[in-house]
Image: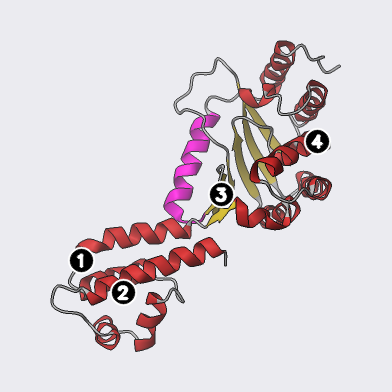
Amino acid sequence: MSTDYRKARQDLGARLRELRLWAPGGRLTGTQLAHQCGWHKSKVSKLENGLQTATPEDLKLWAEATGQPEAYDELLTRLRGFESHVRSWRRQLAAGHEPVQRTIAAEYARSAVIHGFESATIPGILQNPDYARSIFRRYAELQRSKQDTEEAVRARMQRQDMLYTSHKRFRIIVGYAALRALICTPAVLAAQLNRLDGFIGADTVQLGIIPPDASLKLPPTGGFWIHDERLVTVETWHAELWIDDADSIATYLRVWKTLQESAVYGNDAHNVINAARRALNLPERS
């Protein structure tokens, strides 16, 4: 369990204790509260000390038993918040990027269908080694983390073996800005665009590109990845979110499907990539 998750569960426990001690009808002992909720008395202690994760039903019973049913919505919001597993980069990258790559590779290995969207960078699963090297170096500088660039690149390239696994399906959308972002040298970007072009029409990869003049129903913000509709991962500047509640996953899937309406595929996708090459004076793929 991540430190962030544990801390959030402890904070929820402290709030539960506060509700028990400040109940309108007078403070309740743990034993009294457990009796009202039909629980073993140890459950109250475990919840208040962050040793057990409450369920929505637990929170509802707690709010009602303490005479504060209006607190239920707040408690549920707190629960949903830490169920999203906020994984700070500072803690994740303490040992470098390579262990993080291994962790996400394990989720890819568990998944049969993966929906992904990136607005400003080429997706990691489709990167070539030089492009990935540029990304890892820049993020290590930003986060002031361990420089294990070569190990991280190798781990990312090994994850790409899954692209050729017949029972997996990757449904990926890339924004036009990613095709022109010089996060690397022009020569590296040219090679990366060639690699990206090569995935169009692949058996296991459905690659869509959002053209610069596409009509959009939603603004394309940060990237996200949906694993079998059981997990969504979202990267922010300070942390990586692992979201596993059904309502949020359904929202991300709706976002992905809405963005897909603006994407082009096949020869049209080839043409968009070539347009990006011309805009940067990069050689077109022969």
Task: Judge by depth and name the residue closer to the eye, 228 or 57.
Answer: 57
Q: Nearer the viewer, mark 3 or mark 1?
A: 3
The N terminus - image quarter: bottom right
Do tag 3 and tag 1 residues touch (Cβ < 8 Å)?
Answer: no
Crowd tier of the residue under label 4, counting other residues whose Cα lies within 10 Å: few below 14, some 14–19, many 20 or above: many
Disc 3, SS: strand
Please report the bounds of the magenta region as a residue range: 243-260
Residue at 26% x, 87% y: name it: 35
Mark carried by residue 69: 1
User: Closer to the N terminus: mark 2 or mark 3?
Assistant: 2
User: Closer to the N terminus: mark 1 or mark 2?
Assistant: 2
Mark carried by residue 239: 3
At which x and y percent is residue 104? Answer: 67, 53
Residue 251 highlighted magenta (yes or no) = yes
Marks 4 and 2 sit apart, C-alpha to C-alpha, by: 52 Å
Mark carried by residue 158: none
Marks 3 and 1 sit apart, C-alpha to C-alpha, by: 33 Å
Q: Is residue 265 above or below residue 41?
A: above
Crowd tier of the residue under label 3, counting other residues whose Cα lies within 10 Å: few below 14, some 14–19, many 20 or above: some
Crowd tier of the residue under label 2, counting other residues whose Cα lies within 10 Å: few below 14, some 14–19, many 20 or above: many
Do tag 3 and tag 4 residues touch (Cβ < 8 Å)?
Answer: no
Q: Is residue 93 above or below residue 27?
A: above
Disc 4 marks which residue? 128
Task: Judge by depth and name the residue closer to the eye, 260 or 196.
Answer: 196
Residue at 52% x, 58% y: name it: 85
Q: Amino acid at mark 2?
A: Arg
Q: Amino acid at mark 1?
A: Pro
Q: Which secondary structure dominates the residues rendered in magenta?
A: helix
User: Closer to the N terminus: mark 3 or mark 4?
Assistant: 4
Q: Amino acid at mark 4?
A: Asn
Mark carried by residue 17: 2
Do tag 4 and tag 2 residues touch (Cβ < 8 Å)?
Answer: no
